[in-house]
Image (cartoon, rainbow, N blue to C red):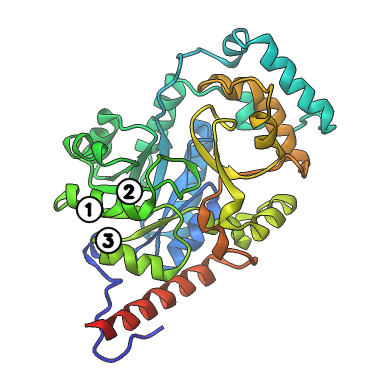
Amino acid sequence: MGLPDGLPDALRNALCERLGIEVPIFGFSHSVDVTVALAEAGGFPVFGAAREMPDRIEADLKEIRARIGARPFGVDIMYPALAADEPDRESAKAKLPAASVAFVEGLRKKYAVPDQTKPHFFSHVLRNQKLFRDQTEAVLASDVNAVATAVGLPREVIAAAKARGKVSFALIGSVRHVVPALAAGVDVLVAQGNDAGGHTGPVGTFTLVPQIVQAAGNTPVLAAGGIGHGAQIAAALTMGAQGAWLGTAWLATREYHTPPVLLKKVLAATSEDTVMTRAHSGKPCRVLKSAWVDEWEAPGAPAQLPMPYQHALTGELLAAIEEHQVEPLVYEALGQSCAWFNELTTVHEVVERLVRETRAAFAQSSSYR
């Protein structure tokens, strides 16, 4: 993966030096194994803890640290605005519209979904302020190197992370979010475009990134959303970003242990096979197309409920769909970068390919000078 003679290694930039990583590839994943593998490959892994209980977060972070040693890694936590701060699932379920409950039960019967038998976050936990506080305390008490906030920007969390010597990241989807993020003291901005999987905003990545870079001043910016090829990383770096943030990429790796039915769908997916919907959580979310989305968008379907009520409504059914891999309904958050991940590979192979492609793109662009 060497560079052509005379070409500087633009991949080793100031942010890499600051964080102690070899390449400016940042990877978000809910998988411990992916987190470990990306650290070993020289990138900066960010473990997604938003779907974990505090005791599980503590155990996972200890395992990651034990396996990667002194290599750096971060944790991502969500702080979404909620329609109401319900104390528990039963309280939220008591307020669900009868028509919505009947619709979900109709889906269960239509697709013959077996009953759930295993615990699952969506069916056992309700997102509320207490959960957010407890998750935050577990992360702050750990020795992680960085804390990333998503779907919300709590100033007190940024301050607490910085007070403990942790680097702070904030995922933002609009240029208007830059000023409050900088005022909160965020160290790194992640400009996440609409191409991204999961909860994201309305502006496309390569429209958003240069706006964020321009507004950020000296604060480093990462490009996120739909990135799956090294040429995109080269473009992001050329626009002033200091790295690329990827999430969808890791679903197609052996380390993620993606369930077989979902894996088959992911490997076959094109960029057009993703869609924005509120049917997952009640907030706009880019996911893999499936009958789940189709049913919620069909004429006569009830309106999707705001967070946290949508998961209070659908949590048990979603857990059962995932457990039993009910093919028509199976889906996952998926970005438009899925087009580049159509074969099962490893985290190391993904990083090597991205680095090779990025350097090749820089080498090719040098001919225009």
| Foreground label between 1 and 3 | 1
In space, the residues marked 1 and 3 are separated at their CA atoms by 10 Å
Q: Return the x and y of residue 103 as percentages of the image width and height.
A: 73, 20
Q: Which of the labelled discs sits on residue 213, or is there none?
A: 1
Q: How many circles with numbers are drawn on the protein?
A: 3
Q: Secondary structure at mark 1?
A: helix
In the picture provided, is 273 more to the left or to the right than 44? Answer: right
Q: Are marks 2 and 3 in contact (CB under 8 Å)?
A: no
Relative image position of residue 257 (x, y in whole percent): 65, 55
Mark closer to the chain start, 1 or 2: 2
Give residue 129's quadrant in the image: top left
**Residue 205 visible in the shown view:** yes
Given the image, on which type of amino acid does mark 1 rest? Val
Dot 3: what SS?
A: loop
Work out whether residue 45 or residue 202 is closer to the camera in this orientation and state it: 202
Q: Are marks 1 and 2 in contact (CB under 8 Å)?
A: yes
Q: CA distance from mark 2 to mark 3?
A: 11 Å
- Name the residue that disc number 3 marks: 242
Q: Earlier in the sequence, mark 1 or mark 3?
A: 1
Query: Which is nearer the N-term, disc 2 or disc 3?
Result: 2
Horizontal and vertical percent for residue 107?
77, 27
Q: Is residue 114 visible?
A: no
Which marked residue is nearer to the observer: mark 2 or mark 3?
Answer: 2
Q: Residue at x 58, y 33 (%)?
A: 280
- x and y percentages locating residue 221 in the rendered image: 26, 53
Q: Residues within 10 Å of mark 1 (few under 14, many from 20)?
A: many
The residue lying at 62 percent from left, 7 percent from top is: 94
The residue singled out by tag 2 in the image is: 191
In-front residue for pair 317/105 = 105
